[in-house]
């Protein structure tokens, strides 16, 4: 056989082999990326590729209901109607998700569905400037008061921000900053005897959000053995303790601002005038009783009341 023809044929086969190998490597890489993304609980970036003009005052309320509440259609409808009325009154969007749907879609554990639900919501609503995560076991006691009035206007936030305050009461050496530029605040939350609260908090929808959520969703945190009901909040508490880059963008405010309780071991119990109240009810029946009891006690809405902030 002609040597030149033989070499040409071998070169052709080698080229085909290289192309096949490259295609296989590309497919393997995509498969690995998809599997890793699915395991981490989400498959899409938060920000849309399209440029979205955001209203700096736009707020989105997220309600994530667990199985116990989702399985009680009567109470769930009552709860969501109440949230919808508040949201419409103040010009907010309302999003409801079920943790079982998040778990089914992304394969997450139900005790870790909150982080994924937030990420999915921010991806679906890139126009929102802030997301308010509010536990379904909460009652807004002053429905005439907006978040801007309650906490988000600069004067109110400056007065509420806890300076040089322990992030975790059990670890008093880790503290918040003495000074903070209000423009740097990306996360507004509270803490109690279990650490950082994730039952009522505000997260700004900018470049900080994916950074925080990716860090919070670290698989090593999920491997850590802790009480299931404290899984996500324990991880966030730990993250704030060890990550000063995140902590410097967090405004820790008094629990009485966003997280008054019905039964607290410390002085955090609800008092008349508090913005909202949270319950530790364990099933839909007890949560509905709590809801009905406190709705009857809430301040009547006065549409003619003059707003202190424009």
Image (spheres, grey):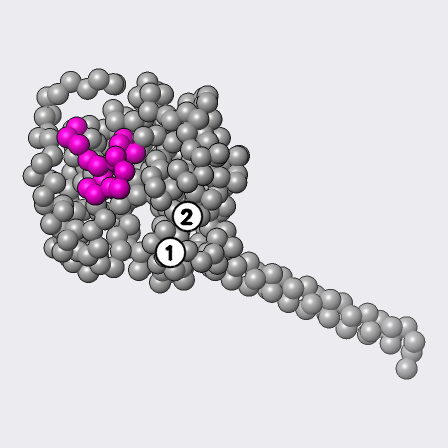
The tally of labels here is 2
Q: Position of residue 98 (x, y in %)?
A: 28, 55
Q: Quadrant of residue 176?
A: top left
Residue 84 visible somewhere in the drawing: no
Q: Secondary structure at mark 2?
A: helix
Residue 227 marker: 1
Are the residues tagged 1 and 2 within 8 Å (C-beta)? yes
Task: Name the residue located 43 percent from the left edge and 43 percent from the top edge.
Answer: 237
Task: Name the residue located 10 percent from the left edge and 45 percent from the top edge.
Answer: 292
Specify whether residue 152 is painted magenta: no
Specify whether residue 263 is painted magenta: yes
Q: Is residue 25 above or below residue 114?
A: below
Q: Is residue 163 above or below residue 245?
A: above
Cα distance between the residues tagged 1 and 2: 9 Å
Q: Which residue is mark 2?
A: 234
Tell me the magenta residue range. 255-273
Label 1, residues with CA under 10 Å away: few <14, some 14-19, many ≥20: few
Task: Name the residue located 18 percent from the left edge and 46 percent from the top edge.
Answer: 80
Q: Is residue 245 above or below residue 308?
A: below
Q: Quadrant of the C terminus?
A: top left
Q: Quadrant of the N terminus?
A: bottom right
């Amino acid at each position: 056989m002609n040597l030149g023809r033989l070499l040409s044929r071998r070169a052709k086969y080698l080229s085909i082999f290289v192309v096949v190998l490259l295609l296989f490597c590309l497919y393997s890489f995509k498969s690995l990326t998809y599997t890793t993304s699915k395991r981490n609980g989400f498959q899409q970036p938060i920000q849309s590729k399209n440029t979205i003009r955001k209203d700096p005052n736009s707020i989105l309320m997220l309600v994530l209901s667990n199985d116990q509440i989702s399985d009680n259609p009567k109470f769930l409808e009552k709860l969501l109607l109440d949230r919808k009325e508040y949201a419409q009154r103040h010009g907010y969007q309302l999003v409801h998700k079920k943790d079982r749907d998040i778990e089914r879609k992304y394969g997450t554990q139900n005790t870790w569905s909150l982080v994924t639900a937030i990420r999915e919501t921010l991806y679906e609503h890139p126009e929102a400037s802030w997301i308010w995560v509010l536990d379904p076991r909460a009652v807004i006691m002053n429905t005439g008061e907006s978040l801007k009035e309650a906490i988000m206007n600069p004067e109110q936030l400056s007065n509420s921000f806890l300076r040089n305050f322990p992030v975790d009461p059990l670890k008093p050496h880790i503290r918040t900053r003495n000074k903070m530029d209000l423009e740097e605040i990306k996360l507004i939350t509270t803490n109690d005897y279990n650490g950082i609260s994730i039952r009522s908090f505000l997260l700004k929808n900018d470049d900080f959000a994916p950074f925080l959520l990716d860090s919070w969703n670290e698989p090593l945190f999920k491997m850590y053995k802790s009480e299931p009901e404290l899984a996500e909040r324990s991880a966030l508490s730990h993250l704030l303790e060890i990550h000063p880059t995140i902590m410097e963008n967090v405004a820790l405010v008094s629990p009485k601002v966003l997280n008054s309780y019905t039964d607290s071991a410390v002085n955090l119990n609800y008092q008349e005038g508090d913005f909202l109240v949270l319950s530790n009810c364990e099933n839909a029946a007890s949560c509905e009783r709590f809801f009905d009891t406190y709705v009857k006690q809430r301040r009547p809405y006065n549409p003619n009341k003059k707003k202190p902030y424009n």
